[in-house]
Amino acid sequence: MTTTTLLGDTARLRATADFVREHDTTTLLPLLLPGLDGLELRALADRCRFAHAALLVFPPDHQALRAELTACGLAADTVPQPSVVVRERLASRHGRDVAELDVRILRPEVHGPDGERRMVEVFTLTVPPDSELAEIAAHERTEDHEAHLAFEVGQPDPLVLRGLCAILERHGAVADGGGYNPNEDGTVFYFTVPAVSKVGYRRVELYAGGDHRDVLAAHLEEHRARQPAETLLRLLTGAWTTQALATSAQLRLPDAMDTRTGIGAEVLARAVGAHPDSVARLLRYLAMLGAVAEDRDGFRLTGLGTLLRADAPGSMRSLALMYGGPFYHSFALLPHAVRTGETAFEQLFGENHFDYFARHPELADRFDQSMAASSRMFEPLPAHPVLTAAGAATGPRTVVDIAGGNGALLGRILTAHPNLHGTLLERPHVLEAARRSLDATGAGERCTYHPGDFADVPAGADVYILSRVLHDWDDDRCLEILRHCARAMPAHADLLVIERLLPTDGSTSLATSWDLHMMCNVGGRERHADHYAQLFDRAGLHLVGHSPLPLDATVMHARKPAVPAPAQRRGEIERGGPGEG
């Protein structure tokens, strides 16, 4: 690397620092987006502020970087952090493995014209003399792909973020990627500025503190639509992601990690009894997924990765082992399922998954635990008006959970409503574990355990629950189950059905993914709300309404249709009312 090149980086760094010192939010936005009207400018300025300008530099070593920062009047003692987003962008542009690119971020502070504290965001990729990375450095200095201006969103929420993105897009800014950085718990939305922009930057960033990947997903979808080959390549490697997460869970790697302090790959490898270099490579991939984060001490667990620990509240470890285990293997036979309409799981294992798990108790336990991993879905359910009314009623009221597994949902409901009694209908071999689970909640003494199948739904209760049951079956079997419920229900009883509903507008939904899973592994299906309404009608029930639950789930409320009193019915006939041909 020559002295001229070094001076080039220093000059670029100095120009960036001067730009940040000279501009403020209200003067910069109209330059970026000519055509902003007064209301739009105010909406942007009220909700975000000019926070920094960024560039990527390529010092030969850390000492050279400190000298460049000092020469530009910037603090040289800023602690660098790993950059997830820029590292991935560089790797994608230059066809490199992300593990080869140790990109760091420094944010020395400067002050704007109004005295407001801002930063220069300095991305650094160390490129020693004669390094094979020199070609990347030369290209990036010429193109300045990572140079951008950033606006930090104050008090971000999904509605505000979508609104700000919409204003930028309306004035010609184009989605240009982004990502979530678990190292600093922040979400980045990149845009290419319109050609008519009057500043020397081609990209702008909206930065929102916290995890906003739900809003980011739509933003990235627009970006990927213009890069079909890259998008397809990422989709084709989805199996690698499943296996990487499942492997970390199988090794109990998350259980050996800390959420605050990084641990070296060799130490972790010894703790889990694995090959050190292979563990390091797995950890780098997990860092790209956001399951772990890398710091100067090694790798630490993120909030996402914590869900793979066996002892974590809401642990998804069992789910990872199921999706990376038997269900993963059966998905290899998806072509058979699509060609024949038969279930891939049965083709592979010789029987349906219920019977197979019943013959393999360890898998049955894991399956029940994996179902419990979605317990967040049920958090709002005890507050449903049907359950609230039953819990507040005078006199005893009973809730029946049909095929309720380990009793986790019933325990949640009984804990929220101390006046309710519960009945759990399940297969005999499941009830013992459910009894222990409900006793642990303190609600076991208010619960009756009813061994049996769908034909054995106990009669005379006040509320019946079918949670994630109907999607396991075809329409004929669903109709049979619902008719068993209808026969058992008194006229006043309510039925709550929890399922994922397929969207009617083609929007992204977990239901669409689970529909494929049902086809491949179970033989059931996800359905639209209208489809369920038709099944209810055929079973002698009426869909009263439905409301959303977390994880793209929905609770549907059904009842028996109201039957008019005899005197009322006779009067209608005499008047030629309803029922007249």
Image: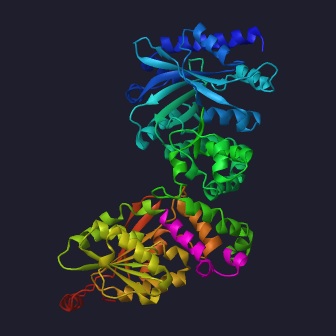
Relative side of 2 to 557, left or right: right
The prevailing secondary structure element of the residues shown in magenta is helix
Q: Give 454 or 162, whichever is nearer the viewer.
A: 454
x and y percent of residue 62 in the render? Answer: 66, 19
Range covered by the magenta-colored residues: 345-373
The N terminus appears in which quarter of the rendering? top right
Query: Residue 350 magenta-drawn?
Result: yes
Relative side of 475 to 136, left or right: left
Q: Is residue 225 visible?
A: no
x and y percent of residue 375 in the render? Answer: 44, 63
Residue at the (66%, 37%) spot, across then down: 88
x and y percent of residue 11 in the render? Answer: 64, 10
Q: Quadrant of residue 47?
A: top left
Q: Give 67 or 210, whichever is nearer the viewer.
A: 67
Q: Quadrant of residue 78?
A: top right
Vertical comparison of 417 with 289: above or below: below
Residue at the (70%, 19%) spot, across then down: 61
Vertical comparison of 527 with 178: above or below: below
Q: Is residue 341 visible?
A: yes
Residue at the (74%, 12%) spot, across then down: 5
x and y percent of residue 59 in the render? Answer: 69, 18
The C terminus appears in which quarter of the rendering? bottom left
Relative side of 471 to 66, left or right: left
Query: Residue 151 magenta-drawn?
Result: no
Q: Give 52 or 429, whichever is nearer the viewer.
A: 429
